Amino acid sequence: MKEVKQFQTESKELLNLMINSIYSNNEIFLRELISNASDAIDKYKYASLTSDGKIPLVDPEIRISLDKKNRTITISDNGIGMNKDELINNLGTIARSGSKDFVNKIKEAKEKQDLDIIGQFGVGFYSAFMVANKIEVRTKAYNEQAYLFASEGEDSYSIEEISKDSNGTEITLYLKKSSKEVDYDSYLEEYQIKSLVKKYSDYIRYPIKMICTSSKQKLDKDGKPIEGEYEDVKEDTTLNSMIPLWKKNKNEVKDEDLNNFYKEKFMDYEDPLISLFVRVDGKITYDSLLYIPSHAPYDLYSDSYEKGLQLYSKGVFIKDKCSELIPDYLKFVKGLVDSPDLNLNISREILQQSPILKKISENVEKKVVEKLIELKKTDFDKYVKFWEAFGEHIKFGIYSTYGTKKDLLQDALIFHSLLKDKYISLAEYKEAMDKKQKYIYYASGETVEAIKLLPQIEKYRKDGVDVLLLDKKIDEFAIMMLREYEKIEFKSISNESTDDLSKEEKEKVESLSASNKRLLDNIKDALKGEVDDVIISNKLVDAPVCVSTKEGLSLEMEKTLNEQPGSEEKVKAQKVLEINPDHELFNAFSAIQDQDDLVKEYASVLLDEAMMLEGREVKDKKEFVKKLNGLMIKALAK
Ligand code: ADP
């Protein structure tokens, strides 16, 4: 006898959403039904194993059949099946808590045309209504009466007794008519089903079978192939590969397997620089394959680049590029995460807010960074290759998190060393420091070569004090966030402060400043608006002048910030012109220090020189040339 029943209210809402959905990714219905089938087989297996032999074990199988004439696709399994009550409870209602929430969220998302949200959830059985306008479920639990559940997605469904030989569930979808917007007919094509299974369900543990047609050479009487004659042959084919690489025993998986998998899955022609096979068994369980490419993906710096790892749950594909799994600064990392703790249930809170994903992400981040730091120790050359491709991201990680990731990331940093002329870590710098040295010194500029030419670096070279050479825009900003490394503060060699001078040096500077006060004041006066101060320098060996800055912005930072698109308001570093008291030029100025006008006239040449030595543009080139020519004419005429 056929009974007609009403769907529960929440179910109706969800059904409605599905039926009216033109979600372009409606292909996920297949993933949902296959994973239900796989769960049902899991349950049957469990029931059998715990039945003292009463329920026989069977070879598990999920089968897909296509019927073009009737426009149906049928997915069947030999799993646990459902009795009448279960049918009503499982398919007539959304039994899980929180589902109402989900329906609301999805409604909101729909209003915002953000339909992608559907794909991020297991929308379960009802997702079939995205592609079908009528669904029949034939199901039989072991040793029970079989039933047919049928629904056209409206308010009600019907249930009636039927006869069915084997236990398990068979779900037949009557596909909607294709329209201009949506093509449902493609789901009747073998190749389409094959590719969807590969895409979403390749690693389902049970075979997903389908009778497939292939073109084979005809055979003659003796079984030999006949040249040029082909026929269509139907063969039962398993569509999925069943065992995911990341589910295998770690020691069974060779580097080559990991590399090949990477190239195939993430479409790279080169082996990755680093492959990482992570298995975590704890409060949260997950397996992960993580890769660092050997070169930056071509679109890494474009707006269209999407970071993220693939997300699986128990071998079932949930989402490509799940951005919640990886922090921004590791956006170049590729890979996947498979966790049984996440399931496809729609009752799960929105993926973005999932505390499980957050935990996994933190863990993945830690694993990646630890691996990098280990690589730095074991294969420095390889690490340098990594650094040249992605080092700026690590520094960006420090900067963008306001230094909160300092402890995690500081030992991954390497910088060019002035004295060693190669990359060194902060630990190496510290190790080589003189006991009396107060700071970790750094200098910044466009290129390592340009930094080496800075006038203020000479002294450090001469004194055998190492300086880190920062040639990337992000560097100083990251250093600013770090502030110190193991209690040793960083200091720019272009910082005007003199707190690291010896007593004698300080005294020398002070006395010279006092005796040349009028000269310094005059220069300062002439350069008003250009520099904040003019001082006697202790930094210079051969060069006559240099420009330093007060605490805060450096010249490099000023430049970087002002280059940012849309930075209307120009930021300004507080510049200080430093003069080398041991240089002949200083003596010349000293000699004319009473002639205020002359001092003022040539003050700008001093600043221009200093800016040039810093690798900067001269502000007023015409004026500079005029003054230089004046001096040359005088000198040459002598
Ligand atoms: P979910 O699978 O996320 O729980 P669904 O709406 O897909 O939600 O399915 C609801 C319930 O229906 C399942 O939890 C399961 O108990 C039952 N079910 C669905 N498909 C099958 C199947 N192929 N065999 C047995 N039971 C099934």
Image (cartoon, rainbow, N blue to C red):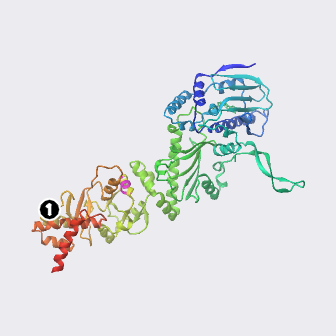
Query: In front: 231, or 406?
Result: 231
- Amino acid type, residue under disc 1 in the picture: Asp
Q: Does residue 585 appear in the picture of this structure?
A: yes
**Residue 424 placement (x, y as % from top left):** 43, 64
**Mark count:** 1
Judged from the image, the quadrant occupied by ligand 1 is top right
**Residue 491 placement (x, y as % from top left):** 32, 59
Residue 225 occupies which quadrant of the picture?
bottom right
Residue 495 vertical placement versus 541 (above, below): above
Q: Mainly helix, strand or loop, the magenta region?
A: helix
| Residue at the extreme right | 221
**Residue 259 placement (x, y as % from top left):** 61, 57
**Residue 250 placement (x, y as % from top left):** 64, 52
Left or right of 553, for residue 420: right
Residue 511 vertical placement versus 136 (above, below): below
Left or right of 199, for residue 593: left
Left or right of 521, for residue 258: right
Q: Secondary structure at mark 1?
A: helix
- Look at 65% across and 37% down and name the residue there: 184
Query: In front: 47, or 348?
Result: 348
The quadrant of the rendering that contains the N terminus is top right
Left or right of 164, for residue 135: left
Q: Does residue 606 appear in the picture of this structure?
A: no
The quadrant of the rendering that contains the C terminus is bottom left
- Magenta residue check for 477: yes
- Look at 30% across and 49% down and name the residue there: 568
| Residue at the extreme bottom | 638
- Magenta residue check for 110: no
Q: Which residue has dot 1 on it?
A: 521
Magenta region: 475-480
